[in-house]
Image (tube, helix red, strand yellow):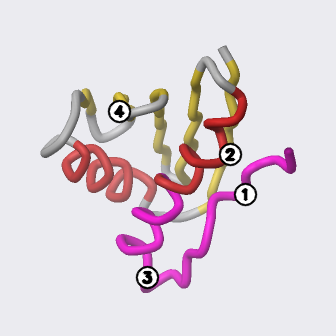
């Protein structure tokens, strides 16, 4: 499996984790608490953890070519939820 992970510093990590999971829960399998979440995505999965300082997201897939797409799905949704924080993208590591 191939993974990519990033941590974004925000005081609203738990809020965004729950928003992401509730949103994706209308379409796919999710599990979440205020501190941790799991989302089954079309080409992989995402795991999240939130603490008082931020949000950690890890995407995982069998095909390395799918990593950018998974990152993009997370980024696009967070951009909508975190617009007040001027969020643009998770600080994913360079490929």
Contact check, label 3 and label 2, Cβ < 8 Å: no
Contact check, label 2 and label 1, Cβ < 8 Å: yes
Residue that badge 3 annotates: 83
Residue extending farthest top: 1
Q: Quadrant of residue 70?
A: top right
Left or right placement of residue 30 versus residue 88 in this view: left
Residue extending farthest right: 94
Compared with residue 35, is residue 29 higher up or lower down, i.e. above or below?
above
Residue that badge 1 annotates: 91
Disc nearer the start of the sequence (3/2):
2
The answer to whether one can see residue 47 in this image is no
Disc nearer the start of the sequence (2/1):
2
Mark linked to residue 6: 2
Disc nearer the start of the sequence (3/4):
4
Q: For the magenta stretch, what is the residue range?
A: 74-95
Query: Total marks drawn?
Result: 4
Residue that badge 4 annotates: 39
Q: CA distance from mark 3 to mark 2?
A: 19 Å
Left or right placement of residue 4 versus residue 83 in this view: right
Residue 15's spot in the image, x, y percent?
A: 32, 57
Contact check, label 3 and label 1, Cβ < 8 Å: no
């Amino acid at each position: 499996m191939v993974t990519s992970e990033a941590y974004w510093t925000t005081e609203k990590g738990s809020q965004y984790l729950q928003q992401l999971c509730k949103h994706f829960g209308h379409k796919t399998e999710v599990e979440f608490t205020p501190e941790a979440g799991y989302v089954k995505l079309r080409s992989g999965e995402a795991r999240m953890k939130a603490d008082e300082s931020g949000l950690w997201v890890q995407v995982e897939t069998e095909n390395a070519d799918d990593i950018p797409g998974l990152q993009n799905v997370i980024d696009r949704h967070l951009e909508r939820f975190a617009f007040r924080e001027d969020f643009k993208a998770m600080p994913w590591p360079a490929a």
